[in-house]
Image (tube, rainbow, N blue to C red):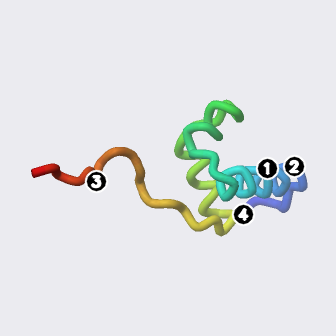
Amino acid sequence: MRKPNAARDQLLHDLRNAYEGGASIRTLVASTGRSYGSIHSMLIESGTPLRGRGGPNHRRRVP
């Protein structure tokens, strides 16, 4: 098990705040240089409620 690390705790806090403020995981990947999987894992670790997948997947059909 890892020892508590102040720098890691700060990163988790910053990632959570950015994500809850509307940043996407991919935006966080670009800004930190870490992998998608590591950012996703850190958000889960910090207790961040993740948003559902977005995008133009659910368009209305026009008759």
Mark 3–mark 1 distance (CA, rounded to whole Å): 34 Å
Residue in the foreground of this view, choosing between 38 and 18: 18
Question: Which residue sits at x=65%, y=69%?
Answer: 47
Residue 42 x, y percent position in the rendering: 65, 55
Residue 25 x, y percent position in the rendering: 57, 45
Amino acid identity at mark 4: Met
Circle 1 or circle 4, nearest the eye: 1
Helix, strand or loop status at disc 1: helix
Q: Which residue is mark 4?
A: 1
* Label of residue 7 in the image: 2
Q: Are marks 2 and 1 in contact (CB under 8 Å)?
A: yes
Question: Which residue sits at x=65%, y=40%?
Answer: 28
Q: Which residue is mark 1?
A: 11
Quarter location, residue 26: top right
Mark 4–mark 3 distance (CA, rounded to whole Å): 42 Å
Q: Earlier in the sequence, mark 1 or mark 4?
A: 4
Q: Are marks 3 and 2 in contact (CB under 8 Å)?
A: no
Number of on-image labels:
4
Mark 3–mark 2 distance (CA, rounded to whole Å): 40 Å
Q: Which residue is mark 3?
A: 58
Amino acid identity at mark 1: Leu
Circle 2 or circle 4, nearest the eye: 2
Circle 4 or circle 3, nearest the eye: 3
- Left or right: 10 as drawn, with respect to 28: right
Q: Earlier in the sequence, mark 4 or mark 3?
A: 4
Quarter location, residue 50: bottom right
Residue 59 x, y percent position in the rendering: 26, 50
Q: Earlier in the sequence, mark 3 or mark 2?
A: 2
Helix, strand or loop status at disc 3: loop
